[in-house]
Each structure stands twice: as structure tokens, then as C-alpha cells.
């Protein structure tokens, strides 16, 4: 069952369709966490105010990040939200007025998965993707078969929607029901909607939607999956299991792809992602012998993986990195899949051999800096250590993701948890270590979020690093440290923010969410 609700609002008559200041996916395509295109001037931020704050349904939460989209014939931007109650909305980004909403099938009840990580219902959790060439938004929604209001875990059903913008009508061939899917690399691994959770933000490669799945609270006999679906006709193209034979036995499970909601890193036809804990055995590398990352393994647990997506949506594993102590990380739930992979700008961040850099972090308190084209395999470093470019060891655990700033020498940003500061590391192209600590904030955070950096059209001296914290709310800092400190920029008090969020930007505005509220700040 679906319902459409149309607000009675006149649409401003100015032809525009997806302008440069829009946000049509989570952060940027390579997940570098740097956005120069939103007209954010740090000199004006202290003058900002809360422009509007809307509260929606009781029990509704926005785990999927909002998107900013300028519809045809609009003079101002729109904000699109998708919630755990399977409700999508188009909001006037300037006024906060509701323009249009659509309620999809009744959402899956979290109690049916015996998991309270997402309280109440688990409808739309992963951030959608907007194809600006066709004005179509893609997202995954979890409910029950035949649109039932319930029926237990065995009756759960995932659907991939493609809806026209700004109208929210179904594209022909959609929604796609994800029933009866079998992994191409292990026919015994079947996709189960009642067990799976589509948490990372949706990505696009060529004519394919690319999505990743983990689990609800690591319950049941789950495995991680990478899925491709045709954007043209909705045909499922490939499903790859991250726990597969021969390395994974039938008693093995895990290696979910959840990344705290951070999207898959994409460069052309290539994608990078990180996996979580493996359960039930160490897999191929349990013998603790060096292994090439270029030789695919079935038990892809506690790993960073690099895949290529074919023109037909086929999935091809190219490379992986697995920490030498991955089995120990498994035992204490210290997975490196807690944050997504960030591909850093190749114009600034280059290895000494000229290679592009990738970085990922985990609960074990390490960030791994890798050669994106040669991740490192297993135990290929000196004495069986990790063959990576650098290991950064902050004093606490890590959740959520990494941001970067490629100008003024280059910087990395991340938050440690719990009760840790925002940290900034400076790039040293000719130093013994690629990155060294440059500064930190006086403010400490709960830490379950990913920072993000803006600048005023790429102008040096205008970069701002932002955080959206469950305890400290929305915060902004000058991105280049001063005397070892990240200096805070005054902002209106937003209150707490939903966990694992990043601020979302429009044209000189920032949007964020908490529980059932959506908040806009700007001039």
C-alpha cells in the first residue's frame, strides 16, 4: 500500500534542475569528505541562525541523511528526507514548508529482528542516491511481503525503489523486490530480508546501483552482501557474499558491510568498502601466512576490499587488505568495518610512488593508510606486519568516517570515541610519516559520526570542518589548526543530533536531524 500527500504550495517558476550546490548523495563520490561547492563562507557563519525546525511523526527517525535537490522550475532548493517509517518528503529548503510526501509499505518492526539499534521500525536506513541526469532517486525500503503491517522476520521484504523527482512516482520496472537472491560466489548464501540491513549510503557506477548490506545487531546467520541492480530496467545484476566457500564454512557468518552509514567509495568503475567481524572461523588466512591481496578470498572479514563493477553490473574482486591481527579484532568486536573507506584527492595526497591513497579506521584504535591500488593483502609487511603506508594510532577507538582537506598542504580529520576530540593530521609529502598530528579541538565528542569539510568555492583560507554529534550537536571549526588547536566557529545551539550523521549542505545552508526533527541553519 502506498499513499501520496501533496502540500498546496506554488512552485517558483525558474527553470533549474539539480544545481551545483545540491547534495545528491552522501558526501562526495570518493567519500573524501571534502565539499567546495556550497557557498559556505566562514566569515558569515557567526551570523547564522536556525531558519526552521520541523518535527514529524512520533517515533520517526532520520538515519538516512537528507539530500538537497533543486527541482525543475524552482527558484530555491528542496530538501529530501527518508525515514525509518518508510516516509519520503520533499521540503522547501528555504522555508521548511512541506511540498510533497509519500508513505510506502508499513515499515519492518525492529523487534522482529530482536535488535534495538534502530528503535521502533527499520524502514529506510541507508541514504538514497539521486541520478541528476534523469531526476530519479534510488533507495532501499524494508517492510513486509504484500505490504502487510507485520508478520515476523520470515515475512520481511526489501525493495529497491526508483522514484521520479520531484513527484515521487515509481519508475517503470520499480520497485524491485529482493526475494530469492543467491550469491554468485557461493550458491549456498541466500539473501534474507529479515536478517539483512541496508545501512551504507547507496552508490552508483555506470548503469548500476551499488548497495551494501550488513545485519541487525549481528544476529542470526547473516553475511555481508554487495549488490548491483540495473538503473534501466531494475534487473538484479550481481550479488556477492563476503563470507563464502571455500574460506567460510556453513557455520561461518558475519563480514557485514555497515560502515556507520558512510557510503561506498567510488572511482570510475571501481568501489572500495570495509567489512566487519567474522564469526565461526578465521577463514583462509587463519594459518597466519602472508597472502597476496590480489588473490580473492572467501572469508572477507575485517577487511578493506576493492571491486570493479562491469558494464553489465558484474562484480569482480581485485584486491583486499586484512590486518595481521584480524582474528583478535573479531574476538573483541573491534571491527574495521565501523567506518567507510575514504579515497583521498590524488592532486595532493600521493604516496611516494605516486599512488592514490585510501584510509579506513576501526574500533581497535587504528587508522590504516593504504595504496588504493595495492591495498596490502595479509601479513606482507616486515616481520608479518601490515603492508600499508602508515598506521595512525589515536588514543581511543574510532567510529564513523574520515574527512580531508586537499588545500593548504592537506589535512585529515576524524573523531575518537568515546569522549574524544576532533583531531587534525597534516600531510607531509617528504616526511618519515605521511601524516602527523597538527591540532585538536577543546570540545570532546561522543564520537559516533563522520566529520566533513567545506570551503568557499575552493578558496584557501575558507575551509571549515563540521561535526554532528549525539551529545554536542552541530559544531564548526576552522579547518587549519592554529597553534595546535582547531578553533571553533560560533553556531546556534541545535541540541543533540541523531547518531552516525554528517551535516548536509545546500546553497549557503546546512541541514541536520535529531529523532523526528529536521533543522536548517543559515543566514
Image: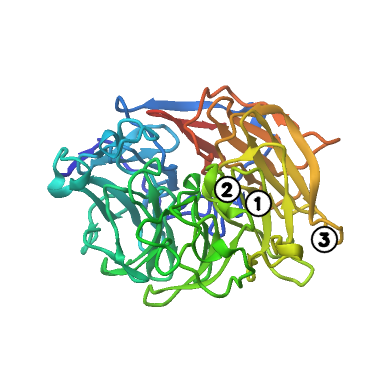
The residue that label 3 is drawn on is: 429
Say which element carries label 1. Answer: loop
Label 2 neighbour load within 10 Å: few <14, some 14-19, many 20+: many
x, y percentage for residue 228? Answer: 36, 66
Compared across the picture, whether 280 is left or right of 344 comes to: left
Label 3 neighbour load within 10 Å: few <14, some 14-19, many 20+: some
Q: Looking at the rendering, in which quadrant would you find the C terminus?
A: top right
Q: Earlier in the sequence, mark 2 or mark 1?
A: 2
Residues at circles 3 and 1 in contact by the CB criterion of under 8 Å = no
Q: Residue at x 23, y 52 (%)?
A: 169
Compared across the picture, whether 99 is left or right of 377 comes to: left
Q: Nearer the viewer, mark 3 or mark 1?
A: 3
Residue 214 visible from this viewpoint: yes
x, y percentage for residue 336? Answer: 57, 50
Say which element carries label 3. Answer: loop
For marks 2 and 1, give the CA distance. 41 Å
Amino acid at each position: 500500500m502506498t499513499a501520496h500527500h501533496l502540500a498546496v504550495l506554488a512552485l517558483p517558476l525558474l527553470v533549474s534542475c539539480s544545481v551545483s550546490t545540491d547534495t545528491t548523495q552522501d558526501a562526495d563520490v570518493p567519500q573524501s569528505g571534502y565539499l567546495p561547492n556550497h557557498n559556505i563562507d566562514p566569515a558569515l557563519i557567526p551570523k547564522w541562525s536556525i531558519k526552521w525546525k520541523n518535527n514529524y511523526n512520533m517515533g520517526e527517525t532520520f538515519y538516512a541523511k537528507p539530500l538537497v535537490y533543486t527541482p525543475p522550475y524552482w527558484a530555491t532548493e528542496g530538501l529530501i528526507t527518508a525515514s525509518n517509517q518508510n516516509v519520503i518528503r520533499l521540503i522547501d529548503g528555504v522555508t521548511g514548508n512541506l511540498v510533497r510526501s509519500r508513505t510506502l509499505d508499513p515499515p519492518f518492526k525492529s523487534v522482529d529482528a530482536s535488535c534495538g539499534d534502530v528503535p521502533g521500525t527499520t524502514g529506510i536506513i541507508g541514504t538514497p542516491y539521486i541520478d541528476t541526469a534523469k531526476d530519479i532517486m534510488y533507495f532501499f525500503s524494508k517492510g513486509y511481503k504484500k505490504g502487510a503491517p507485520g508478520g515476523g522476520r520470515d515475512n520481511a521484504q526489501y525493495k529497491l525503489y526508483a522514484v521520479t523527482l520531484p513527484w515521487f512516482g515509481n519508475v517503470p520496472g520499480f520497485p524491485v523486490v529482493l526475494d530469492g537472491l543467491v550469491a554468485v560466489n557461493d550458491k549456498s548464501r541466500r539473501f534474507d530480508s529479515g536478517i539483512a540491513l541496508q545501512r551504507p549510503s547507496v552508490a552508483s557506477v555506470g548503469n548500476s546501483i551499488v548497495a551494501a548490506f550488513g545485519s541487525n545487531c549481528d544476529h542470526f546467520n547473516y553475511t555481508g552482501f554487495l549488490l548491483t541492480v540495473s538503473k534501466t530496467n531494475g534487473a538484479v545484476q550481481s550479488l556477492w557474499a563476503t563470507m563464502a566457500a571455500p574460506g567460510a564454512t556453513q557455520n561461518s557468518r558475519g563480514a557485514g558491510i555497515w560502515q556507520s552509514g558512510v557510503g561506498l567509495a567510488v572511482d570510475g568503475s571501481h568501489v572500495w568498502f570495509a567489512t566487519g567481524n567474522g564469526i565461526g572461523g578465521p577463514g583462509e588466512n587463519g594459518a597466519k601466512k602472508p597472502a597476496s591481496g590480489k588473490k580473492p578470498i572467501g572469508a572477507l572479514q575485517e577487511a578493506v576490499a576493492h571491486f570493479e563493477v562491469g558494464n553489465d553490473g558484474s562484480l569482480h574482486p581485485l584486491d583486499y587488505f586484512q590486518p595481521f591481527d584480524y582474528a583478535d579484532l573479531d574476538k573483541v568486536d573491534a571491527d574495521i568495518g565501523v567506518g567507510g573507506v575514504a579515497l583521498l584527492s590524488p592532486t595532493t595526497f600521493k604516496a611516494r610512488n605516486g599512488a592514490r591513497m585510501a584510509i579506513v579506521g576501526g574500533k581497535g584504535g587504528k587508522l590504516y593508510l593504504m595504496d588504493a591500488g595495492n591495498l596490502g593483502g595479509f601479513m606482507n609487511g616486515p616481520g608479518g606486519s601490515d603492508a600499508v603506508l602508515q598506521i595512525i594510532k589515536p588514543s581511543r577507538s574510532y567510529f564513523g568516517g574520515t574527512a580531508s582537506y586537499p588545500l593548504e598542504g592537506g589535512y585529515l580529520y576524524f573523531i575518537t570515541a568515546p569522549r574524544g576530540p576532533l583531531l587534525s593530521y597534516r600531510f607531509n609529502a617528504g616526511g618519515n610519516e605521511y601524516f602527523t598530528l597538527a591540532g585538536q579541538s577543546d570540545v570532546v565528542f561522543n564520537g559516533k559520526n563522520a566529520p566533513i569539510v567545506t570551503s568557499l568555492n575552493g578558496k584557501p583560507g575558507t575551509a571549515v570542518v563540521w561535526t554532528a554529534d549525539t551529545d554536542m550537536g552541530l559544531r564548526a571549526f576552522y579547518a587549519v589548526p592554529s597553534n595546535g588547536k582547531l578553533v571553533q566557529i560560533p553556531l546556534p545551539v541545535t541540541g543533540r543530533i541523531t547518531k552516525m550523521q554528517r551535516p548536509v549542505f545546500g546553497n549557503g545552508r546546512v541541514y541536520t536531524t535529531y529523532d523526528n526533527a529536521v533543522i536548517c541553519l543559515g543566514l
